[in-house]
Amino acid sequence: MQSSVQTTPGLGKILMLVLARDLRLAVRHWDQVLQPLIFFVIVTTLFPLAISPALDELRKISPGVLWVAAMLASLLALESLFRPDVEDGTMEQWVLSGQPLSLLLLAKTLTHWLLTGLPLVLMAPIVGTALGMPQSVWPVLAATLALGTGSLSVLGAIGAALTVSVRRGSVLLALLVLPLEMPVLIFGARAVDLAMHGEPVAGPLNLLAALLLFFVSLGPFAMAAAMRISVES
Amino acid sequence: MWLWFHKLSSPPYAYRTAGLVRPWLFWPAILLMIVGAIGGLVLAPEDYQQKDAFRIIYVHVPSASLSLMIYTVMAVAAGVGMIWRIKLAHAVAAACAPIGAWFTVATLVTGSIYGKPMWGTWWEWDPRLTSELILLFLYLGYMALRASFDDTQRADRASAILAIVGVVNVPIVKYSVVWWNSLHQGPSISKLAAPSIEGSMLWPLLIMMLAFILYFGAVLCDRLRGEILRRERNASWLSESLA
């Protein structure tokens, strides 16, 4: 029984290899990694131009602006999450490899989060300050984005797996994913808003964490089922 | 029972059965709609607060409950199609989506017409209206995904996954929207959800509900037949029955 296992590395090793490969690819194309982040900053810049330069007014809408911009930035990076691997045949090999596809895709989703979600968590306080957000809100803002962008990555990865074989799938992807992501937006923006008014934020933060656990535990199965449909034929 | 189930999953049999069942759903639906309309618009007394404006609930409430019910039917059909690989179940799911989307549109339109005299605006970010709007987006996404595949079988299975993911999400969306809204405004609107409703106002509503469900069944039969024709256009049983 043991001899057959010896030839392939363990699952943990494989997941680490997937992570390391994707991160290495990202470092080699670091300009592509930066694009969603620059997009995030540009979108948040549009609001003062469109509404008013007065910080008092911007402060009121800043949680919503940051959250919508984060959602769109996360969406923008999804397009290239699975597409290169599907186009060059790597994904087919993964499907045939006999390893649990759901975990392999979850590892890829984790990379997506490390490359888009985590930088947003770090950048959001700076951009928030530019919109008049008080410093005391920084920890809450970072916490909501850390929990929320994880959910966004998982939900987005399901949509990306469904649409990866569709021509011009990026608009379709937004159409599928954005309605599903609305609860995350509601709780995330609400928690920041509550924090700005000095009210307790445990409620929405707990709900965000619950959503993250829920999506991380069930999402990979949907991703794997969707990817199997996308790569066959 | 199982034999019947298997027989029903064969396209020619389902095609004929849907054709036979349809009039038995359609005409009672029309009859009940007439009875419900007379009961609701003529016989029911006017509301002491909302006057005659409340009468739109005889269309609004059945549409709203059907829009959710049809999404569930669609997701169950999609799940049956995925698990037992029954093509006909996918055809049912495909037939459900446009009907559900139209009922959602009807809910939104009647809701905003209702909102004009009640709230003074055409649109209020009321939790129920907002979650109906999100439901409409889910329907539109489902239909867009289905339309973007050329191969029917792949379209079936990809959209089935979306329907199942969507139906898991519907309660989350629903409660998050309720929670989002309850922080914004007081429960001033909840008077619409009157806990008790007069019997003379209630029975037309129940009749209308039944009529809408039967009507959904009739339209589903029609759409299912159309869907079967489209999918089986090269099948021999079809050319035989048409010859």
Image (tube, coloured by chain):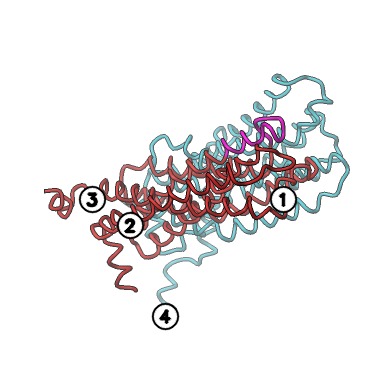
Chain colours: A cyan, B red
Q: Most prominent secondary structure in the magenta stretch?
A: helix
Report the residue at 53% width, 44% height from top. B38
- Looking at the picture, how far across and down is residue B131, in whole percent? 62, 44
| In-image side of B205 versus B151 (left or right) | right
Q: CA distance from mark 1 to mark 3?
A: 49 Å
Mark with earlier residue (1, 3): 1
> Is residue B218 visible in the rendered structure shown here?
yes
Where does label 2 land, which residue? Answer: B21
What chain does mark 1 sit on? B
Secondary element at image label 1: loop
- Disc 1 or disc 4, which is closer to the eye? 1
Where does label 3 land, which residue? Answer: B232
What chain does mark 2 sit on? B
Q: CA distance from mark 1 to mark 2?
A: 37 Å
Where does label 1 land, which residue? Answer: B194
Mark with earlier residue (1, 2): 2
The amino acid marked with disc number 2 is Val
Magenta region: which residues?
B108-124
The amino acid marked with disc number 3 is Glu
Where does label 4 land, which residue? Answer: A1
